[in-house]
Image (cartoon, rainbow, N blue to C red):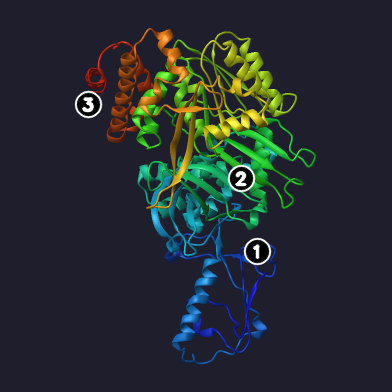
C-alpha cells in the first residue's frame, strides 16, 4: 500500500523542490506493490536532440491532485533540518523508480550508482555491476543493451518488432532465430539515418549496433526476453523467480566474483511482469512437449539452447502464481586441473583420485545442493582411459557426454524424464537395470535417490558392472550418507561397504569477503569394519584401506610404485593448473588431462620429478611455451 506523509503536497523532484507545500499531504508510491493502481508509470515526453543521450524510456511519476495544488508564491526559506528531510524524501522516491522500454516486460529497479562496487564486467547482451546496496544486500545489477538506448533507437526497435509480428500474422512463415534475425536486419536498413544520428558513421560500430539490435528484436519476438541475457552470462549458476513475479526481484547465484571459487547469492535489479514469465513457460512447454496445467503443476525440462535446466511450479501448488528455478550447466567442462586452479582441492587429492579412477574404484560424491557434486563427477569422468566404455544415467543432462564423444570416448547416455512411465525412482532403477545388460561399462549415476541404490549396490558386490561405478548423493559427510543409505534406503550395512571411496564437498565462508567458497572436506575409504571409514587423504592410512589392498593385488605394483604414480599425476596437474592461470584456461581443459594420463602411463617406475621434467618438455614442444 502507498505510504502517506502528512503535511506535504506536490510532485517532488530536484527541479521543483520549492513547490512543495506544508499545508496538506502527499502520497508517495511504493512501486514494489504492483496492486497499487492509484499511481501510474507514464511514458516520458519526446526529447529533443539535446536529451538524446538520456537512457531511460520510461519514468515513474508521483501523481499530483491539481485542484489541491498551492498557489505559486515566492519560495520560502528552507531550514537545514527541513532540507535534510526533503533530500531523504527525494532519495526515497527516486529509489522506487522503475524503467523499461515500451516493448519489454521487465523493469529495472533502483540505480547501480547506489551500490558499493565490487566488480564490473560486460556480458553478452548487457553490462553488469556487482556491489552492496545501501540496505546491506549483495546485488547483481544488469543493464541490458536496449535499456541504455535513447528513445529514438528504442522507437526503431519497437517498430521492427511490430512489423515482424504483423508480417507473420499476415503471411505466415518461419519464426526461428535465423529467420527473425535476417528479417530484422533487412528492416533496420530502412532506419539507417536514425541509427547513424546516434552512433555515427563508423562502419564497424554500425555493424556491431545492428547485430545487437537484431538480437534484441529476436529476444522480444520469439526469444525469452530478459532471460536470454541472464542465461548468456557465464558467471551465473542459478536464476530464481519467486511468485508473484511482479512483486519480487529475480535472485541469482554466481561463481567467480571476488575470487575464482567464490559462490555468491544475490538479488538483482530486475522485476518481471507476468507476461514475461508466461512467455518463458510457453517456450519450455513447446520445446519439451510436456504438460503444465493445474492438474499437472510441475514442469521440469532442459533449456537446450542455453545448456540449462528449468523447474516450474504453478497453481495450485504455488498459490501466488508461477515460480521458476533455472540451473545453468558449466560452459567449460570441469577437470581436476580446473578444480585445483580454483582452490576446490589440492594437487595430492587430485592425483589420488585420478589413480583410483584408472584402477576402477567405486565412488560416491556427497554434498549439499550447490556444493559442486556434479562438477567433481564430471571431472572424474575425464580420468577414464579412452578405451573405457561409459554409460550415464541422469534426469538432467549435466554430464559432459558430448565433449567426451568428440574426444573419442565411447559414451552411451540414458535420459530419464516425465515422458517415461512411473515416477523418478522407478525410472532410475529400470534405467540402471537396462545399463547392466548393455555390456561391460563404467556406470555413472547423476544422482542416487532411492530404489536404484539397491540395484547399484548389487552391481558393486557381484562385479556385474565390470568397471567403476560413480554417483552423487545428498549428504554432508560419509557418516551421514551411510546412515541415510542404510536406514532410509534400506540397503544393508554390508552392501554399503562395497563403496570404495566417498568424497564430501562443502562450502566454507571466506572471513575476508564473506563469500561462500567450495572445498573438498573429506576423502575417505570404507574400512574392514562395517560402518567404519579411513581418511585416505592421510598418506599413512592409504594402504590400510581395502581398495588399495585390492589395487596392490591386481595391478602388480608395489607400494612405492603406487606412491610414485600418485605423485606424478599430482605434480603434472599442479603444473597444468599454473599454466592455465598464466597462459589461458585451455590448459585446464580435458584434452590436456588425456595427454597427462598418457604420459604417466608411459613413464612407469620413474620418479615424479623425472616424469614432470619430461612432461614439461612435451608441453614446450606442443605449445611453444618455454617452461
For the residue carrying disc 3, how many other residues have a C-alpha within 10 Å: few (<14), some (14-19), or many (20+)? Answer: few
The mark that comes first in sequence, 2 or 3, is: 2
Q: Position of residue 125 (x, y in %)?
A: 47, 45
Name, please, the residue furthest toward the front: 529
Check contact, mark 2 vs mark 3: CB within 8 A: no
Mark-to-mark CA distance, 2 and 3: 54 Å
For the residue carrying disc 2, how many other residues have a C-alpha within 10 Å: few (<14), some (14-19), or many (20+)? Answer: some
In the rendered view, tell whether residue 395 sits above or below residue 207.
above
Mark 2 sits on what residue?
163
Mark-to-mark CA distance, 3 and 1: 59 Å
The foreground one among 445 and 366 is 366
Figure quadrant of residue 544 = top left
Q: Which mark is residue 625?
A: 3
Mark 1 sits on what residue?
33
The foreground one among 574 and 451 is 451
Q: Is residue 137 visible?
A: yes
Q: Position of residue 595 (x, y in %)?
A: 34, 18
Amino acid at each position: 500500500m502507498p505510504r502517506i506523509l502528512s503535511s506535504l503536497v506536490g510532485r517532488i523532484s530536484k527541479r521543483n523542490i520549492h513547490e512543495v507545500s506544508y499545508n496538506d499531504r502527499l502520497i508517495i508510491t511504493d512501486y514494489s506493490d504492483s496492486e497499487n493502481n492509484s499511481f501510474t508509470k507514464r511514458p516520458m515526453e519526446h526529447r529533443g536532440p539535446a536529451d538524446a543521450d538520456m537512457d531511460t524510456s520510461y519514468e515513474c511519476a508521483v501523481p499530483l491532485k491539481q485542484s489541491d495544488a498551492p498557489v505559486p508564491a515566492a519560495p520560502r526559506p528552507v531550514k537545514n533540518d527541513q532540507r535534510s528531510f526533503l533530500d531523504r524524501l527525494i532519495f526515497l522516491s527516486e529509489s522506487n523508480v522503475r524503467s523499461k522500454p515500451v516493448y519489454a516486460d521487465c523493469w529495472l529497479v533502483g540505480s547501480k550508482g547506489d551500490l558499493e562496487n565490487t566488480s564490473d564486467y560486460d556480458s553478452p547482451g548487457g553490462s553488469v555491476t556487482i556491489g552492496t546496496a545501501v540496505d546491506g544486500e549483495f546485488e547483481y545489477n544488469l543493464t541490458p543493451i536496449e535499456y541504455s538506448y535513447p528513445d529514438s533507437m528504442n522507437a526503431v526497435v519497437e517498430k521492427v518488432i511490430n512489423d515482424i509480428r504483423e508480417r507473420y500474422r499476415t503471411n505466415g512463415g518461419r519464426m526461428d532465430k535465423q529467420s527473425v534475425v535476417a528479417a530484422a536486419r533487412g528492416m533496420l536498413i530502412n532506419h539507417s539515418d536514425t541509427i547513424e544520428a546516434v552512433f555515427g558513421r563508423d562502419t564497424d560500430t554500425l555493424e556491431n549496433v545492428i547485430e545487437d539490435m537484431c538480437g534484441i528484436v529476436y529476444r522480444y519476438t520469439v526469444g525469452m526476453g530478459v532471460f536470454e541475457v541472464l542465461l548468456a552470462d557465464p558467471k551465473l549458476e542459478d536464476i530464481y523467480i519467486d511468485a508473484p513475479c511482479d512483486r519480487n526481484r529475480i535472485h541469482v547465484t554466481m561463481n567467480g566474483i571476488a575470487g575464482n571459487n567464490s559462490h555468491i547469492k544475490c538479488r538483482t535489479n530486475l522485476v518481471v511482469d507476468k507476461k514475461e514469465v508466461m512467455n518463458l513457460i510457453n517456450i519450455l512447454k513447446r520445446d519439451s512437449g510436456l504438460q503444465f496445467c493445474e492438474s499437472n503443476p510441475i514442469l521440469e525440462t532442459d533449456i537446450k539452447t542455453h545448456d540449462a535446466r528449468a523447474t516450474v511450479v504453478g497453481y495450485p501448488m504455488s498459490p501466488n502464481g508461477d515460480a521458476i528455478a533455472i540451473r545453468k550447466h558449466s560452459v567449460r567442462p570441469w577437470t581436476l586441473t580446473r578444480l585445483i586452479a580454483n582452490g576446490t582441492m589440492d594437487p595430492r587429492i587430485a592425483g589420488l583420485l585420478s589413480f583410483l579412477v584408472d584402477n576402477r574404484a567405486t565412488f560416491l560424491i556427497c554434498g549439499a545442493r550447490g556444493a559442486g557434486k556434479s562438477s567433481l563427477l564430471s571431472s572424474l569422468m575425464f580420468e577414464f582411459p579412452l578405451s573405457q566404455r561409459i554409460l550415464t544415467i541422469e534426469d538432467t543432462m549435466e554430464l559432459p557426454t558430448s565433449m567426451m564423444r568428440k574426444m573419442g570416448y565411447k559414451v552411451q547416455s540414458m535420459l530419464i524424464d516425465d515422458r517415461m512411465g512411473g515416477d523418478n525412482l522407478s525410472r532410475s532403477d529400470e534405467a540402471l537395470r537396462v545399463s547392466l545388460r548393455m555390456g561391460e561399462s563404467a556406470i555413472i549415476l547423476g544422482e542416487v535417490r532411492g530404489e536404484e541404490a539397491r540395484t547399484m549396490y548389487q552391481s558393486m558386490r557381484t562385479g556385474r558392472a565390470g568397471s567403476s561405478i560413480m554417483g552423487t548423493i545428498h549428504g554432508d559427510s560419509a557418516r551421514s550418507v551411510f546412515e541415510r543409505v542404510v536406514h532410509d534406503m534400506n540397503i544393508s550395512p554390508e552392501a554399503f561397504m562395497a563403496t570404495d571411496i566417498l568424497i564430501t564437498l562443502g562450502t566454507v565462508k571466506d572471513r575476508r569477503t564473506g563469500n561462500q567458497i567450495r572445498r573438498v572436506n573429506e576423502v575417505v575409504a570404507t574400512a574392514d569394519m562395517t560402518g567404519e571409514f579411513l581418511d585416505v587423504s592421510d598418506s599413512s592410512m592409504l594402504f590400510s584401506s581395502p581398495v588399495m589392498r585390492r589395487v596392490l593385488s591386481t595391478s602388480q605394483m608395489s607400494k612405492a610404485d603406487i606412491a610414485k604414480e600418485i605423485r606424478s599425476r599430482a605434480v603434472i596437474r599442479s603444473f597444468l593448473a599454473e599454466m592455465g592461470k598464466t597462459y589461458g584456461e585451455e590448459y585446464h581443459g580435458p584434452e590436456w588431462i588425456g595427454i597427462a594420463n598418457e604420459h604417466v602411463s608411459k613413464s612407469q617406475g620413474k620418479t615424479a620429478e623425472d616424469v614432470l621434467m619430461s612432461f614439461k618438455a612435451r608441453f614446450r614442444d606442443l605449445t611453444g611455451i618455454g617452461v
